[in-house]
């Protein structure tokens, strides 16, 4: 279930985004950005849900796995 299960269809995207960003910014910056993005995403979904393919709010577990996947991707990048 998108946005509710810890891992969903967007988990791989988060991992790949972290990998790509990690090559450019480093894992600490990527981790901070991923955390801040999850906070901003919550606010954006409340204000403009029509901008999202799945406007339901992420569960805490899903948001945590999203951040973890981004960080893992950054740590795996060269």
Image: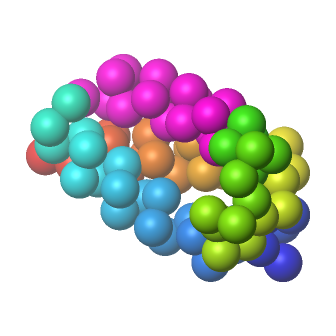
Q: Is residue 56 left or right of residue 71?
A: right
Residue in front for this viewpoint, 16 or 76 = 16
Residue 55 percent coordinates (x, y): 77, 64
Magenta range is 26-41
Give the residue displayed 75% in from the left and 44% down from the top.
Answer: 47
Residue 58 is at least partly visible in this image? no
* Side of 60 where 15 appears, left or right: left
Q: Whole-percent x and y of residue 3?
A: 78, 64
Q: Is residue 28 magenta?
A: yes
Q: Is residue 22 visible?
A: yes
Instruction: Please say if 23 is above or below 58.
Output: above
Residue at x 45% of width, y 67% of height = 13
Colour mapping used in the image: rainbow
Q: Main secondary structure of the magenta part?
A: helix
Q: Is residue 20 left or right of residue 13?
A: left
Tell me residue 41's x, y (percent): 65, 43
Q: Residue at x 14, y 37 (%)?
A: 24
Q: Nearer the viewer, residue 52 or 7?
A: 52
Instruction: Identify the residue shown where x is 67% and y is 44%.
Output: 44
């Amino acid at each position: 279930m998108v946005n509710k299960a810890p891992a969903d269809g967007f988990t791989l995207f988060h991992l790949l985004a972290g990998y790509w960003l990690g090559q450019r910014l480093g894992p600490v910056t990527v981790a901070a950005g991923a955390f801040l993005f999850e906070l901003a995403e919550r606010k954006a979904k409340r204000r403009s849900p029509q901008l999202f393919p799945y406007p339901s709010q992420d569960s805490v577990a899903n948001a945590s796995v999203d951040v973890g996947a981004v960080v893992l991707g950054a740590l795996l990048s060269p």
